[in-house]
Each structure stands twice: as C-alpha cells, then as structure tokens.
Amino acid sequence: MNMYIIWNHRLPATLLLIISLAVIAISSNAQVLHHINHGAGTQTYGQTDVTVTATGNFYYNNVCFSNSYWIGRGPVVPPGTEDYKFSFSVPTDHIQVIISGSNTGERFRFKINNQDYILKSNELFAAPSPISPCVCGPDTVFHIDSVGRLAHTGFYSLSQQSCIMVEVFYPGISALEILYDSYLSNQQSTGGSFLTPFFEEDTTVFIQQPYTDTVKCPGDSLALVYSTNFRFNNNNTFTAQLSNAGGSFANPVNIGSRADTTGDTIWCKIPENIPSGNGYRIRIVSSSPADTSLDNQVNIRIKAAPANISNSSNSPVCTGDTLHLTGNSSSSGITWAWTGPGSFSSSAKDTFIANAQLADSGKYILKATLNSTGCSLYDTSTVEMRPTPTKPTAGSNSPVCETLPLTLTSSSGTTGVSYSWQGPGSYSSTTQNPTVTTSASSTHAGDYISTATLNGCSSRDTTTVVILPKPAKPTAGASNSPLCQKQDLQLTASTVTGASYAWYGPSAFTANTQNPVRANIQMGDAGAYYVYATVSGCVSDTDSVVVTINTDPFVNIFPTPGATICSGQQVIFTAVPTNGGNTSYNWLVNGIATGSTGTTYSTTTLNNGDAVSCAMTSTGTCATPFIDTSNAITMTVQPILTPTVTMTADKMPPWNGGLTVTFTATPTHGGANPEYQWKRNG
C-alpha cells in the first residue's frame, strides 16, 4: 500500500499529472489514491482505517482542497496546532503531502514510524519568487527514503504563500506524524500552513523492517520476513531477488520463492558461486498482481567462500573393498570435514573406509571452510555399496596325467553370479566348469583363478593344478616264444621306475606283475599280449608282443610203391615231419627198431601183416625234446603167381571177308594193370 499526503487544498498541475500517471499505470495493480480529509477520529478509506489526531486545536478548511488541515501558530487558530498524526490500520509504502501557504523560515518535522525527518526552509528554497499558494511549481517534489535520505528534483523557497510537495517512499508506514516547528522569532504568532494528505492503497509486498541479516556466506540460508497490505491473488508467487555487489537489480538473481497470498517468510539461499562484495540488496517481486518491493534498505556483505568445491568417490563400491572419498577446491587455506552414514566423519581432504559394507551406502557430505572468512560450502556424493558374491570354491580333477583331459569346477553360494577363469598360458574362460584341454601337458600346470561376479562385484578362489608326467612305455617280450601247447609262457616287460604293470591278452588273460608266467599254454592262447606301466596314477603307452604257439611235432610215413607188395619186393618208407625242427628218426617194424635212423627206410624182407612205424625226436621247436611216433603201416605181402590169359571172340567162325571180330583177353594173376601183346598167326 502506498500513501500520499498532499499539503494544500488542491493539487498543482504538476502533481496532478504525477498522480494521474500513477493511478493509470497502477490501476491494473489495484492501486487507489485516497485523499485524507476527515476530522478528528477514524475513517475508512478503501480497506484502510485512518485515524487522525492533533496536538493543539484541530482545524481544517477548504483553502485549496476540501478539508485541508491547518498547522502552525498564528491568528487562524490561536494558539495554533503543533502536529497531526495519521495512523493506518494497513501499512502503506507511499505518501504524498502538499504544504501550501507557508511562510519564510517555517520548518516541519516528519516522523515516520516514530523516526524524525526534518525539512528546513533554508535547505529547500532556491527559486527567486513565490507562486500561487495552491499550485506547486514545477520541479518541487522532495523524496524521503527509508534510511532518511532527502532527495529532490528542484528547490523552492518556503516564502509567503509558497507550495511544496513532499513525497515519502518508505516500506510499511503505519504512522506518519507531521510536526510544526518555527525557528524564527518573528513567525511565532503568524506562521502556519495548510496540509493536504494523500495515501496510496495498493496490493503491495514489503520486506519487514528493520532488516538486520547483513553478513552472509555463499550457500547460506536466510529467512526473509515480508508483509503485504492486502491479500494477493490465489495464483501469486513471491520471489526474493538478490542484486549485484553494487546494489543493482539490472540482472537480479532469484534466491527463493513462496506461493502465497499474504505475508510470511521466504526461505532463501545465497548462491554458492556468487562473488564476494559489500553492497548486495534484496527485494521481493510478486506475480499476481505484479509488484516489486523496495529493497531491504541495508547493504548486505557476502564474504568469500572456497571456490570450485566438489567431492567424488569410487562408487559403486563392492562390500569388502575400500571406499575412497576425495575433496577438491581451487582455493587454499581450507578446513575439511566429512560426514556420512553410520556417524562417519573425517577431517582429511581425501579419506577412505576400509572393508566397506552395505551400511556404508548413502550420502557423504563434504564441508569446506575457507579459514580467512569462516564461510563454508558443501558438496554431496551418493555412494552405492553393492554386495560381493560369496567366495566361490574352485576345484579341478588335478593331479592330471599328461595327455588326459583337464577340467575345472567352481561354485558360489550366491545365485545369479557369472563365472570367469584365468590361468597359465593366458588361459581364460567364462564357463562355470570348463574343460581346459582334452590332452594335458606340463604347460597346463599352475594356479587357476575362479571369479564369481554379480553387478560388477567379484570374489575369487584359486586352485592349483598339477600335471603328472606320462610314464615311459615298457617294452613287452615273451622270452620262450614260440612255444608249444601245455608249456608255460614267460612274458617280460622292461623296467619303468616306480611303476606298476598291467598285462592283458588272449582268452581274457590279465596280470599285474612286471614279468608274469602263463601256465599250460593252449593253441587258443596265441596272439598279442599287451603291457602298460602306471606311475602315480598315470598310464604309459601300451606295448605288445605276439606269442606264437606251435602245434606238437608229428611225423607221417608213406610206403612206395604202396602197402601191398609181392613177396621179396622192395618197399621204401619215407618220413614226412610236421613242425619237427631238428629231428632224428628211429624206424620200427612191429615195434622193433630196425636200426635205420634216416628219413627213409628201405626193405625187401617184409612179411605179410608186418607193421612199419617211425619214432621222430624233435628238438628246438618246443622247450624240451619231443618224441612223436608216426602212424603204423600194415603191409600186405602177396606170394608170386604165374599169370595166364584166355581169349574169346565175339563171333564164331567162319568169318566172311570184311567182317569185324572183337577179341577179349581175360587174365588170371595178371595184376592190377597187366600188359598185353596180341599176335596173329604166331
């Protein structure tokens, strides 16, 4: 709300223009100009109750305006009126007072909310001649601001019948008192003036006075208490604005706001990046209706704060790892203070939490205080802690023999983890249970690390793989092969240090000694016999030996010309050995040795029914001498007989010429293949 008090009965043309412009310009803002013109007591103007009281006689007339107030000493209202006090139920920010009919040397005191402001004629006059007592000349508007400063647009003498206008801008005027004071003795009985007061009733916001919060730091909060004279619209917002360090609002900075319709408190924050300075001011602007308050009327000092404050962390951090917190500033001479979850605190610029846990999640606030000013700024980092998976159990099928598969196993108690492996020779895998190789070698030996990962957090376990060398291949042998049935087979294997042996062969043969014996060998036991060596569970390559089983040596004899001969006829017997090796013979007739030892036996003395056989002794084929007796040939020896022959013809004579006659010879004792000689006529 603004208030105008015009001292006179009518407004001069210049002031009328000013007031007219004000009313037109602010009409959309609900500004209303009220002329205070009632007698002693209280009267309502718009929504404001105005109470007028006087010290001395109360008098007003219509000299320039209707119901102007007389103040001063003299014959008009003896002994005079000392002062008028105007009290407002709703404070105003703007008052105009027209003072007319003044005499040279008079002066007036303005008390705004009980604070004095004095207008002296010798300080105000400058123009050479008076004008009409009811018309204020041009450029005669004087201003009083909230800190008691007098400003004006011109000077004019307070001579007889002169006129001045005093314009008061002051936030929250609840009482205006105008006191008459004449300092010239010759004015004691005749001095006096007419007062015509005006006040402006408007929807206005103003900062509560006195304002005392005048030293701040960047980032500080402040409670800006404000009032309004009337209720603003429901959609209104009050915004607090900060000037630059010189008090200029050419580029104001919004520092707080409140959606409200009446007076309250705006919680403001001084920008953290604002430069230090001593001349800052604050004002309030409203949105509905639009209004701008006077500033807080007192310079605000904003001290320097640390520059470019920031903090950081290595978040997200896995449980069990170290949480690192780092502070930064481009300023020197700083005191640092960290606070965080679980009553964490530190005075170091860079700090840490070892073996951080889930409870360490949250906001970490870094306070940086510039030692030279005591101003502090804050920065916050949010730390995310992530659970580390349960440590996996790493394993393998170690020890592993060369050439055999190498497999790894891993298992974590945390579900949803992913697995990875690293090992010798740049080995890596993302399989939980991988096969490293199907044929292990010494290069695969070493430590294998299993990593279980969940949401970027990992735990590890190590398993050590041992690769055992493959034993040397034993050399297989059969010391008595080839051999004969029913003999014992002797198998041999070369020596491999620290080895055990395994044999297998025909007819389901197995043995686990280095040099086993297979007794009572049979023909079905012939074939390949295999042996391998085992050292520390590792198996060598297999070697083999082929065992030959010879059939028993035997001999057959054959007579020439045959088993049937004539008495005294020579017969030759021939021995035909099988698998005989080195042999010797003994010929027998009817089981009696004949003394013949060659491969043949010849005789002409056999009798009918004699049995001829041969005993063969074999050495070298089998392990011991072997004797085989051949088949016995029983001879048929026939006596010698004289052969006879009879002849027959197929036709009986006489025979005619050209007749074919067939003669047939029939032998007696002619033998198997008798020969014939045919004769004619002897």
Image (tube, helix red, strand yellow):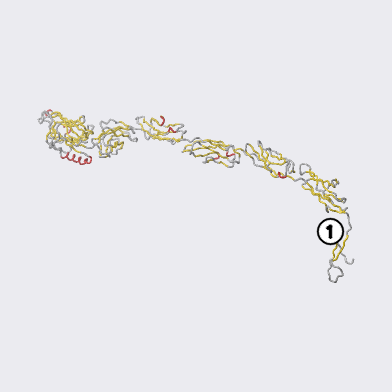
Q: Which residue is at the front of the view, 318 or 164?
A: 318
User: Where in the figure is residue 515, as x and y percent of width and height?
Assistant: 70, 38
Q: Is residue 214 left or right of residue 140?
A: right
Q: Which residue is at the front of the view, 196 or 648?
A: 648
- Tell me if residue 344 can be seen: no
Q: Residues within 10 Å of mark 1 (few under 14, many from 20)?
A: few
User: The residue under label 1 is which amino acid type?
Assistant: Asn
Q: Which residue is at the front of the view, 300 or 124?
A: 300
Q: Quadrant of residue 529?
A: top right
- Quarter of the figure with the C terminus: bottom right
Asked which secondary structure carries label 1, the reply is: loop
User: Where in the figure is residue 477, as x and y percent of width and height?
Assistant: 70, 41
- Quarter of the figure with the N terminus: top left
Q: Is residue 463 left or right of residue 525?
A: left
- Tell me if residue 477 can be seen: yes
Q: Is residue 382 left or right of residue 229?
A: right
User: Where in the figure is residue 392, as x and y percent of width and height?
Assistant: 51, 36
| Residue reaching furthest to the front | 652
